[in-house]
Amino acid sequence: MITRHECGARRRPWAAACALALLGCATAWDDQRQDGGGRDSPGVLLQPGIGGRPGVVAASQDPVPCQCNPGCAAFGGAGSTEPSGAAGAAGQSPELTTGDQPTVALVVFDKSGSMSGSWGPGNKWEAAGQALLGAIEPAQQRLTVGAILFPMGGDVCDVAPLDDPWQLGFRSGPEFLRDWTVLAPCSGPDGNTPLELAFRVADSAIQVARDGGLLERRFIVLLLTDGEPNCNSDLGVVTGLAAKWFDQGIATYVFGLPGSENASAVLDAIASAGGTDVYVAPGTPGELEQGMAAAM
C-alpha cells in the first residue's frame, strides 16, 4: 500500500508550495485504500522509483498528480535526448543566431533565497522559469535540455548532481517542457549561491554528455543568476571551467537578473571566459526570454 509518507515531499521542507499536489496524492492514497490497490482495480499502482527511491505514480485509469515526490516517474531522472533534427558538427563554436541547428542546452539556474524577490507579475524564480519555457517552446523539436538548480541538496551550499531526481537530466525539448512543470513548483527559492560547485556539477554533466554523444551537436551553457556567488566560491575555478568548455566548442551565456548589478564584473568575467564577451542584464522577463531564445 502507498503510504502518505511515500506520497509526500520526502526531502524538502516546501510543504506550502506542494499543498495542492499533496492533496492529489492524498486522494490517490484514499482511492487505493478503497479499491484495495490491486493491479486490476482502478486507483494508483506502486511503481519503481528513480535512483532506488520509493515510487508513487501511474493511475490505472485516470492520471493522479503526485508532485513533490522524487519517486514519481515524471519527476527528475533522464529522458530521451534525441531531437527531431540531425546532429550538428562536432566542436563547432556556437553563434548567437542558431537557425535550425539541433542544440543541447545545459541550464545552470540560481534558486537562492534572493530569487524570491519580485519581478514582473511574480517573483524572479517564477518569472525566469516561465521565460525559460517560453524560449524553449518554439524550438523544442530540435532541442535537448538539462537543468542544474542550485543550491539543491541537504545544505544551503549543496548542489546535487544532474542525475539526482531533484535535477532535470538531459531530455528532449518537449519532455523538458512537461517535466519542468512537475519540478518547478517543488523547488522554490532558498539557500545561498554556490556557483563554483554548480559549475563543477555542470562540468561532470558535460563529461556525461560527451560520453553519450551529445557534444557532437551544438552545445551551450546558460547561466541564470541574480547576485554574487558565495559559499566560498572561487571565481578562478568558475571562469576556468567556462574557458575549458569554450575550448570544447561550448559557449556560456550569462544572464544577470535584477539584483545582480553589484556582480557585473564577476558575470562579465564568466561570459568572457565562456566566449560570449559580456553578460546580459534583461530588464523584464520578456527580455530574458528573448535573450535565451536567441542563444538557443
Image (spheres, rainbow, N blue to C red):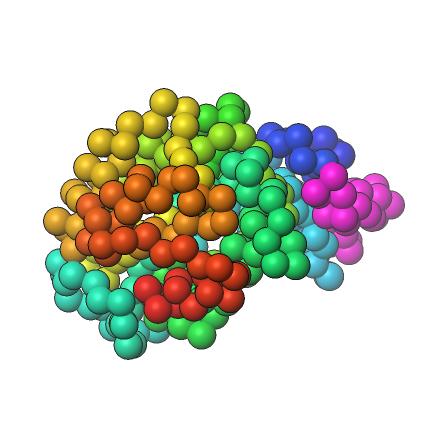
Residue 214: x and y, percent? 25, 56
Front-most of residues 201 and 46 = 201
Which residue shows up at 76% across the image and 34% down it? 4
Asked if residue 245 is positioned above or below residue 84 in the image, the reply reads above
Q: Please state, as top left, top right, bottom left or bottom right, where the N terminus lies in the image.
A: top right
Q: Give residue 207's quadrant in the image.
A: top left
Using the rendered image of the protein, determine whether residue 49 is visible from the camera's viewpoint: no
Residue 264: quarter of image: top left
Residue at 51%, 66% in the rendered image: 286
- In the image, what residue occupies the spot 23% across and 39% down? 239
Residue situated in front as seen by the camera: 178 or 99 = 99
Magenta stretch contains residue 25? yes
Decide: is 69 above or below 209.
above
Furthest toward the bottom, the residue is: 99
Q: In the picture provided, is 199 more to the left or to the right than 180?
A: left
The residue closer to the viewer here, 23 or 16, is 16
Report whether residue 65 is seen: yes
Q: Position of residue 46 (x, y in %)?
A: 65, 43
Q: Which residues are magenta?
A: 16-44
Q: Residue at x 22, y 31 (%)?
A: 236
Judging depth in this view, the residue of 84 and 242 nearest the camera is 242
In the displayed structure, 236 sits above or below 287; it is above
Taking the magenta stretch, the answer to whether it contains residue 253 is: no
The image quadrant where one finds the C terminus is bottom left
